[in-house]
Amino acid sequence: MNVLVLNAGSATLKFQLIATDRAAIEREDDVKLARGLVERIGGHALITFQREGGPRVFREKTLRDHRAALAEFLSWVVSEESGVSAVRSPADIHAVGHRVVHGGQRFRESVRVDAEVIAAIEDMFELAPLHNPGNLKGVHAATELLGAGMPQVAVFDTAFHASMPETSYLYAIPYSHYRRFGLRKYGFHGSSHRYIAYRYRKLRGLPKESVNIITLHLGNGCSACAIREGRSFDTSMGFTPLEGLVMGTRAGDVDASLVAWLAEKEGLSVADVESMLNKQSGLLGISGLTSDMRELLAEEAENGDRRARLAIEIFCQRVRKYIGAYFAELGGADAIVFSGGIGENSAAIRERICRGLGALGLELDATRNSHDGGARVISTDVSRLQAWVIPTDEELLIARDTARLLASPPPAAGPSSGR
Ligand code: ADP
């Protein structure tokens, strides 16, 4: 089954075309066919398309909306020029899987999209005003261009964290706010943490119940997840993705009182301060230079920039703090797993995070850590707490959930987005 995976933002659309089905999942031989990215939808769009293993195709074109962006991808993918031989017409696309950021309290697993699911996602606009509306634009574009009969599946960023207990997800604020508004921790990056935990369990040959680990998704956005018996027990992002670790431009944890204080002091609205915490803080805010970890590491190494170093140190210390907290919450863990752009690619950051974790029984192997490569152990053979690098693949998880759901009996027969 050729599954088109769509990740639609407010002005962006990411595509991946993946051939998968139950047998391929079992054998782990799903085939990536092509990918694409359209940025600045609504204006002069920047377009990148690529057949797997092929050259990147760049284009610029005015694209009015997500429908136009998807049409552009479809016409490229079926063309001779793309070289994607498995897809010669839109009829060769058999299903669409969507990343949807917020599933609220309702969606605990992936679901097939129908009118009622769309209405429920719309109901959650209030919870995720920056994300869910964009995600739905992807659904509507697919319906318009591929037909109302095209099976579509929604995979929620929050769903993996639906297993968190109340003790993890409730804030210590008046309980009525939770009851009235669903004001609680939801957590995000769920598809990534779920995929990493799945890969870890496969690589170690463990049953799901034996997976007790701390996963670290460190990219532009960053989050940690405490996984107990294969399920999310706690995670660092909260009601919104702002909470928790220091990120590229997000502050992560701060004292909530600073919002009112700063609004008053600077004559800002609460929304302005929230925007500052999301867009001008984190690595960018501390360094005053950039949100990009690679650039910060270069600044530190080449120019000894003090604030670049400070930003990196605060970033690493915050990750370490969460590892310690989650280790305690879980009553011990078997491994920490690094993922995301920083976690997968930066041996230096992994090493700096792990400094001081000897107390938890972690002994990093400098040689293993410095080697590039795919999923692997980077701790020594005698390390009591293991460290791993496992590249994340949210698109693959979305494609697999889509294939699994469509191969299952109708929803009335029971839940089907297993792992
Ligand atoms: P997103 O969260 O947007 O998917 P990524 O997972 O691609 O982002 O992560 C982007 C971050 O990863 C950037 O801060 C980038 O500098 C960092 N990064 C990528 N490669 C390296 C590297 N070799 N060393 C340090 N940081 C890196």
Image (cartoon, rainbow, N blue to C red):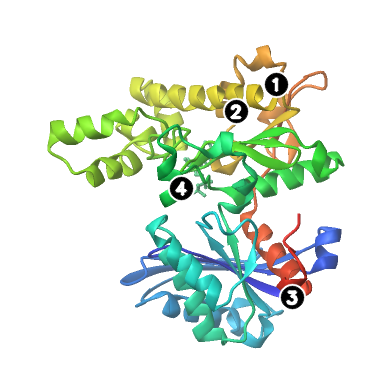
Q: Which residue is mark 3?
A: 410
Q: Position of residue 309 (x, y in %)?
A: 41, 22
Classify mark 3: residues with Cα within 10 Å, few (<14), some (14-19) or many (20+).
few
Q: Which residue is mark 1?
A: 364
Front one among 329 and 399: 329
Front one among 78 and 70: 70
Q: Residue at x 87, y 42 (%)?
A: 205
- Compared to residue 383, the image places residue 55 above or below, namely below
Mark 1 lies on a secondary structure that is loop
- Compared to residue 342, the image places residue 2 above or below, namely below
Question: Alpha-carbon distance for marks 1 and 4?
Answer: 45 Å
Q: Earlier in the sequence, mark 2 or mark 4?
A: 4
Q: Are marks 1 and 4 in contact (CB under 8 Å)?
A: no
Q: Nearer the viewer, mark 4 or mark 3?
A: 4
The amino acid pointed to by label 1 is: Leu
Q: Earlier in the sequence, mark 3 or mark 1?
A: 1
Question: Alpha-carbon distance for marks 2 and 4?
Answer: 40 Å
Quarter of the figure with residue 79: bottom right
Mark 4 lies on a secondary structure that is helix
Q: Which residue is mark 2?
A: 350
Q: Earlier in the sequence, mark 3 or mark 2?
A: 2
Q: Nearer the viewer, mark 2 or mark 4?
A: 4
Question: Alpha-carbon distance for marks 1 and 2?
Answer: 9 Å
Is the C terminus in the top left, top right, bottom left or bottom right quadrant? bottom right
Is the N terminus in the top left, top right, bottom left or bottom right quadrant? bottom right
Mark 2 lies on a secondary structure that is helix
Question: Alpha-carbon distance for marks 3 and 2?
Answer: 44 Å
The amino acid pointed to by label 4 is: Arg
Q: Residue at x 65, y 65 (%)?
A: 52
Q: Residue at x 86, y 59 (%)?
A: 27
Q: Which residue is mark 4?
A: 179
Q: Are marks 2 and 4 in contact (CB under 8 Å)?
A: no
